[in-house]
């Protein structure tokens, strides 16, 4: 896992001419900061996009994990009357969706979420896949624990937050990490609904910067610079800088949840 990321980091500090001449190397023959200077030419924009992405990830992960846990716990209870119907309703959304046009109309005309943070938070709040994984974990919790809590006078909300949640730390940490990855890497919803420059997340900003660089290098003649040396533009190294900026924070977070990750996925798996 470390070696590919080390190669990406090395390429991000390599000159464009060296990449074209020698290809990718773990130890660059020319150590330059051209790509980083290009990306951080306007540092305020990068910092603001980082803040937007971090805020969306924090709010979306907390709210999405709560909703996923509540839905999964409900359909995992054998005494829930509509368990099968609700489970099929959740599973059905994994096979079919409403399409892009109804989704856009819902977000803009009914929820009025255009140019707001909610446009990037609401679509990822509930994933049917995560619900089914967490449901498999909750289904393994003995019903006797819930019944004993009821005998002690606990109601459903108290049972969920005081009994079920503490017993489900590995599964919740795993699902929370998956939700966080989804929010951190999301850029398509921002492309659809965000026009305000102050609300552009990091991923969409990097995509736009990369596209603008490619358009510039591919249309030098049309722009009036036919003799400009393309090797001076850090196209490849800038891509690696974007990978470092986008993946770096999540790689720092992942080790803290790694001990829960495998356990959470395996205990929630379904037996055939």
Image (spheres, helix red, strand yellow):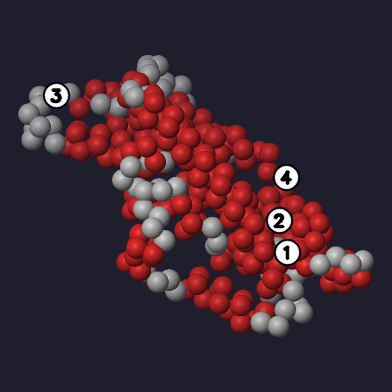
User: Which picture quadrant has residue 255?
Assistant: top right
Residue at the image position 68 percent from the left and 39 percent from the top:
256
Marks 1 & 4, CB-CB < 8 Å contact: no
Determine the CA span between mark 2 and mark 1: 7 Å
Marks 2 & 1, CB-CB < 8 Å contact: yes
- In the image, residue 137 sits, relative to residue 217, either above or below, namely below
Residue situated in front as seen by the camera: 260 or 75: 75
Residue at the image position 10 percent from the left and 27 percent from the top:
225
- Left or right: where 134 falls relative to 114: right
Q: Which mark is residue 107?
A: none
Give the residue number, with chain letter if any, for mark 2. 171
Give the residue number, with chain letter if any, for mark 1. 137
Residue at the image position 69 percent from the left and 54 percent from the top:
172
Determine the CA span between mark 1 and mark 4: 17 Å
Residue situated in front as seen by the camera: 5 or 185: 185
Give the residue number, with chain letter if any, for mark 3. 228
Lower position in the chain sequence, tag 2 or tag 4: 2
User: Which picture quadrant has residue 45?
Assistant: top left
């Amino acid at each position: 896992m470390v070696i590919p990321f080390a190669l990406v980091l090395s390429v991000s500090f390599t000159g464009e001419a060296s990449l074209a001449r020698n290809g990718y190397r773990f130890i660059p023959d020319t150590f330059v900061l051209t790509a980083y200077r290009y990306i951080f030419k306007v540092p305020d924009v990068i910092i603001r996009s980082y803040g937007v992405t971090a805020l969306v990830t924090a709010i979306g992960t907390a709210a999405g994990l709560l909703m996923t846990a509540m839905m999964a716990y409900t359909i995992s209870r054998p005494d829930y009357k509509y368990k099968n119907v609700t489970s099929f309703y959740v599973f059905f959304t994994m096979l079919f969706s409403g399409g892009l046009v109804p989704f856009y109309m819902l977000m803009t005309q009914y929820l009025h979420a255009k140019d707001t943070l909610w446009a990037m938070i609401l679509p990822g709040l509930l994933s049917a896949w995560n619900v089914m994984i967490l449901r498999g974990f909750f289904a393994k919790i003995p019903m006797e624990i819930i019944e004993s809590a009821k005998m002690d006078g606990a109601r459903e909300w108290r049972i969920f937050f005081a009994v079920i949640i503490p017993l489900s730390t590995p599964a919740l940490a795993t699902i929370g990490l998956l939700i966080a990855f989804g929010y951190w890497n999301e850029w398509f919803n921002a492309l659809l609904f965000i026009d305000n420059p102050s609300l552009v997340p990091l991923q969409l900003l990097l995509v736009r910067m990369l596209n603008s660089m490619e358009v510039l290098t591919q249309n030098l003649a049309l722009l009036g610079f036919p003799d400009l040396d393309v090797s001076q533009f850090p196209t490849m190294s800038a891509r690696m800088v974007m990978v470092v900026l986008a993946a770096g924070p999540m790689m720092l977070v992942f080790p803290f949840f790694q001990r829960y990750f495998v356990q959470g996925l395996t205990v929630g798996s379904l037996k055939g």
